[in-house]
Image: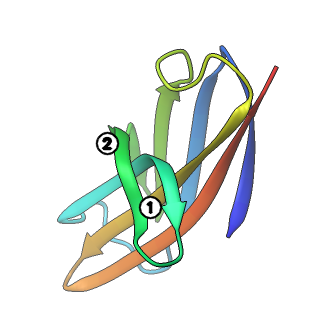
Amino acid sequence: MDTVNITIGNTVEISVEVEELSDSPTEAKIEIYKTYSYATGLTDNVLTVQPSSISNGVISFLFDTDTLMSSPGTLYGRFFVLDSGRKINAYFKLKFKY
């Protein structure tokens, strides 16, 4: 699971490049969760982020950290896209620091 390092109080932009992605996928989102367990997966959703833009195979997401974390810690993310019947899931950690 890849880690994204984030400074608390900043706006975060995450851009994901997907090969052969149309400019209008059926669904695209990032979900952020409080907890991850190998047995149960991701639980306690705290935020779902819709794309700010989709162009030339790149999906960009913007969100503020103020609503997520006020002190250092870790949250867990899931990137999901559904495009022409093809589903992609990718999981990552969000590591917050000052």
Q: Residue at x 61, y 61 (%)?
A: 92
Q: Secondary structure at mark 1?
A: strand
Q: Quadrant of residue 91?
A: bottom right
Dot 2 falls on a residue whose secondary structure is loop
Closer to us: 13 or 45 = 45
Residue under numbered circle 1: 79
Name the spot of residue 64 as percent of width and height, x first: 52, 21
Q: Is residue 58 above or below residue 45?
A: below
Q: Residue type at mark 1?
A: Phe
Q: Residue at x 32, y 42 (%)?
A: 48
Amino acid type at mark 2: Gln
54 left or right of 9? left
Q: Position of residue 59 (x, y in %)?
A: 45, 54
Foreground: 41 or 82?
41
Residue 25 lies, with reference to residue 96, above or below; the image says below
10 Å neighbourhood of mark 2: few (<14), some, or many (≥20)? Answer: some
Distance in Å between CA atoms under marks 1 and 2: 10 Å
Residue placed at 51% from the left, 71% from the top?
A: 90
Residue shown at the point (44%, 46%) measured from the top left: 32
Which dot marks residue 50?
2
In depth, the one of 91 and 36 nearer the eye is 36
Residue 38 in view in this figure: yes
